[in-house]
Amino acid sequence: MSGVRWHNDSPLPTRTWTCSYCGKATGNDKGFSDKEMGRCIYICPSCSCPTYFEGNKQVPGAPYGNSVENLPQEIGPLYEDARNCMRVYAFTSAVLTCRKILMHVAVEKGAPKDKNFAFYVDSLVNGTILPTNFKSWVDKIRQRSNEANHEIIVMSLDDAKNILNFTEMLLKLLYEYPALMS
């Protein structure tokens, strides 16, 4: 990066963010800046790791959403993959991973393997896995992920946030909350 002139300008404009290293909601007014280019590196006061900002873009970004407890071994890593896609602005990948999560949930809850996506969606909403009033949530994930999978379109930040929010709530409903009751 030729021409970059980082300066230890303390204080910088105060900024708050979620640190991608320690996961804490944090803020600071200390770090380094390249005033000419409008870029800054802030140092997390909790773990001392650097986070780069250019406008509102944060690198590395923080995982989106919340962790979900008690996920099965095959579903937990997929959900974390979807959350981590948001860290690198891979919105279409996040939506497609949520699609895959629906398939894994259906199989984990008893649907046979080697079926198509429509079969898995139907097994979630037409059986005893989810209440019928959750069909609209699953249908929203199905519709947007089908568009991401079968059309030449790119998912937006809002698309990915919405799908991840629905997926998180479904996973909490199916795995985290029942475990709290036992």
Image (cartoon, rainbow, N blue to C red):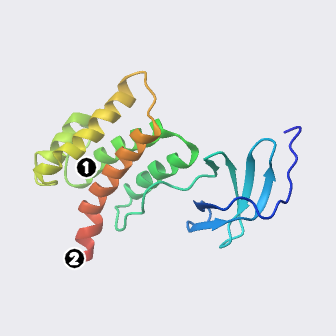
Disc 1 marks which amino acid? Val
90 to the left or right of 135: right
Q: Quadrant of the C terminus?
A: bottom left
Q: Residue at x 34, y 55 (%)?
A: 168
Q: Residue at x 13, y 50 (%)?
A: 133
Query: Is 3 placed above or below 150 here?
Result: below
59 to the left or right of 173: right
Task: Give the residue number, with chain letter if any, for mark 1.
Answer: 107
Q: Quadrant of residue 144?
A: top left
| Residue 112 in view (yes/no) | no
8 to the left or right of 65: right
Disc nearest the viewer among 1 and 2 = 2
Q: Looking at the image, which is closer to me, 41 or 89?
A: 41
Expressed as whole percent of the image width and height from the top left, the position of residue 123 reads 16, 44
Task: Give the residue number, with chain letter if any, for mark 2.
Answer: 181
Expressed as whole percent of the image width and height from the top left, the position of residue 31 reads 77, 61
Disc 2 marks which amino acid? Met
- Secondary structure beneath label 1: helix
Expressed as whole percent of the image width and height from the top left, the position of residue 88 reads 58, 45
